[in-house]
Image: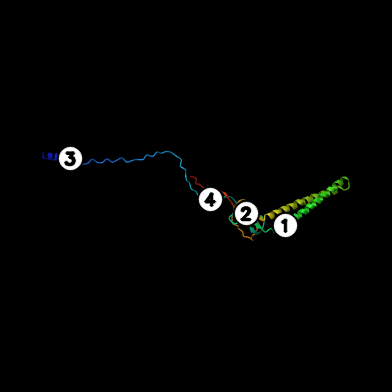
Amino acid sequence: MRHTRWFLLSGLLALAASACEKPAAVRPLPEVGVVTVAPEDVPARLEYVEQVEALRHVEVRSQVTGIIQEQAYTDGTDVAAGALLFRLEATTYRASYQAAMARLRDAEARAANAERLLGRLQPLLVERAVSQKDVDDAATELARAQADVAARRADADKAKKDLDDTEIRAEIAGRADRALLPLGARVTGPADLLTTIDQIDRVYVNFNPSDQD
């Protein structure tokens, strides 16, 4: 009976103690952000190692041999198409051209004489004042003289081209690189590279993407 009262008293004391305690604070719910997922195009950013090349790259070479007498441009500057770049010593080529022209004039004079002779003989043949052989010989001489004129004209044209080629000009407009041979150097012809010209108003950009790109 004594034990029963003790348990009852202990229960009452525990109930009173719990009644005196403050109620536990209620924690607020955490805020959660909401993201709406939607498909969209995203530009790809790819990086490559590039190599820039001129639109045209021209090697400047001489077509004739000779001593460089003048460099008419400044290294690394822009030049126009047809601009003079180098001038070679031209005395020999000028003399050859003048001699070729003299031979051409002589050939043309002989051809003119042969033509006049044939023109005189042909009417005489009708009158039987000359033989057919005379006319044939005159015609043959005229043909020979005309062939000689053609050959001499070809020689003169070649000599004129060689003379013109002593002035080395830009094939294209662009930036002329430094001269590779100094003044006074002997150019042996197309084997010697004099300089280069790059057309840089437009350029090529080369790059190599991978297979995954």
Q: Return the residue at label 2.
A: 60
Are the residues flagged by discs 4 and 2 in contact, CB closer than 8 Å?
no
Q: Return the residue at label 1.
A: 96
Q: Earlier in the sequence, mark 4 or mark 2?
A: 4
> What kind of element bears circle 3?
helix
Q: Earlier in the sequence, mark 4 or mark 1?
A: 4
The amino acid type found where label 3 is placed reads Ala
The amino acid type found where label 2 is placed reads Val
Q: Earlier in the sequence, mark 2 or mark 1?
A: 2
Which percent across, then down, holds residue 176? 60, 54
Q: Earlier in the sequence, mark 4 or mark 3?
A: 3
> What kind of element bears circle 4?
strand
CA separation, marks 4 and 3?
Answer: 90 Å
Quarter holding residue 77 = bottom right
The amino acid type found where label 4 is placed reads Gln
The amino acid type found where label 1 is placed reads Ser
Q: Return the residue at label 4.
A: 51
Q: Return the residue at label 3.
A: 16
